[in-house]
């Protein structure tokens, strides 16, 4: 089953994609992958063919990655969207002989129903990170305000929650890869049925270097104010799915087993 890696921009989707690629997940031919850049020196793990389709899809709906469009009822059947459907099917079919395979593009977080229709049932890995860290990182890269970054974080993650189910998604917290990378990677790999041996897992986990972090908050800053309450509430809910303590940075709940909410056919 294909793996779709979702999450707001600057939430660790690149890191998780590259770690899973190190465990054997095929992300596409090297020529199709976005090259490394100053903001992601280790690489993006992003297949440019999926990015191109997502950008054209968002544009057809009157939006972009930083201006989430309105998804009216029946948008999947609109003329401009159906024109892209056959091209997307061809892209997915090109991976038929490449199991296990998947893709990472944060834009898929808001276009997910389109890809689910094209690719069929999907394993979904949702990457989350402290919303204020995301907003700070986005401000550094794109020069946007913190309020804009927090609002965009909320839009992306609301779309993820609305269009995926707890039985189909695995939520993974960015901080887990800096406190216990092997354990978190092993958890995610096991739950998406990605076969990997201990040595390969160890090598992949070593790629999660703390030096790649743009920002790290030493204590939680989100509070239940009127302005931040929706962000804080959704963040805490996703942290619970990720088995992560939202109130204490870099801390996994010690009493929780390393499994996600039960998935149909799995324990």
Image (cartoon, rainbow, N blue to C red):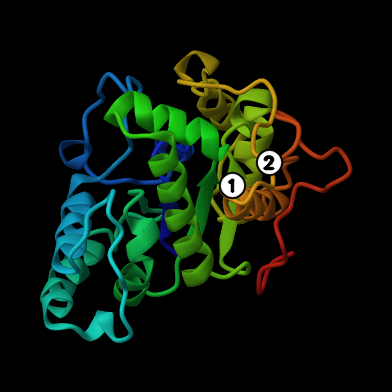
In the rendered image, residue 31, in percent from the top left (x then y), is placed at: 15, 37
| x then y, percent, for residue 64 | 22, 54
Q: Residue at x 17, y 65 (%)?
A: 62
Q: Mark 2 falls on what kind of element?
A: loop
Check disc 1 and report the residue beneath it: 228
At x 66%, y 54%, the residue is 233
Nearer to us in this view, 122 or 222: 222
Task: Reply above or below: 177 against 155.
Answer: above
| Residue located at (54% from left, 30% from top) | 200
Q: Give the CA distance from mark 2 to mark 1.
A: 7 Å
In percent of width and height, residue 70 lies at: 30, 70
Looking at the image, the residue that sits furthest to the front is: 226
Q: Nearer the viewer, residue 64 or 253?
A: 64
Q: Is residue 154 toward the left or the right of residue 263 in the image?
A: left
Whether the residues at callouts 2 and 1 have beta carbons within 8 Å, the answer is: yes
In the image, is residue 81 above or below residue 126?
Answer: below
Residue at 68% from the left image edge and 55% from the top image edge: 237
Residue 9, compared with residue 100, is above or below; it is above
Task: Give the left or right position of residue 84, taking residue 205 as reference.
Answer: left
Q: Residues within 10 Å of mark 1 (few under 14, many from 20)?
A: some
Can residue 225 be seen in this snapshot? yes
Residue ranking furthest to the top = 211
Which residue was labeled with disc 2? 223
């Amino acid at each position: 089953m294909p793996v779709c890696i979702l999450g707001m921009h600057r939430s660790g989707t690149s890191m998780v994609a590259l770690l899973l690629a190190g465990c054997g997940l095929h992300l596409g031919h090297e020529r199709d992958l976005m090259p490394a850049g100053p903001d992601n020196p280790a690489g993006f793990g992003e297949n440019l063919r999926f990015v191109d389709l997502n950008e054209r899809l968002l544009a057809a709906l009157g939006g972009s990655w930083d201006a989430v469009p309105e998804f009216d009822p029946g948008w999947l059947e609109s003329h401009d969207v159906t024109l892209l459907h056959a091209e997307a099917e061809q892209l997915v079919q090109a991976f038929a002989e490449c199991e296990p395979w998947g893709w990472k593009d944060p834009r898929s977080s808001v276009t997910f129903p389109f890809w689910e229709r094209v690719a069929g049932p999907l394993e979904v890995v949702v990457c989350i990170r402290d919303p204020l860290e995301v907003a700070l990182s986005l401000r550094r890269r794109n020069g946007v305000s913190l309020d804009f970054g927090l609002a965009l974080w909320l839009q992306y993650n609301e779309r993820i929650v609305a269009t995926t189910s707890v039985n189909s998604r695995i939520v993974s917290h960015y901080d887990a890869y800096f406190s216990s990378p092997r354990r978190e990677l092993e958890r995610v790999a096991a739950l998406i049925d990605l076969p990997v041996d201990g040595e390969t897992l160890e090598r992949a986990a070593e790629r999660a270097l703390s030096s790649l972090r743009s920002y790290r908050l030493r204590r939680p800053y989100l509070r239940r104010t009127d302005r931040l309450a929706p962000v804080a509430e959704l963040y805490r809910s996703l942290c619970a799915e990720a088995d992560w303590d939202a109130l204490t940075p870099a801390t996994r709940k010690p009493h929780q087993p390393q499994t996600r909410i039960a998935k149909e056919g799995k324990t």
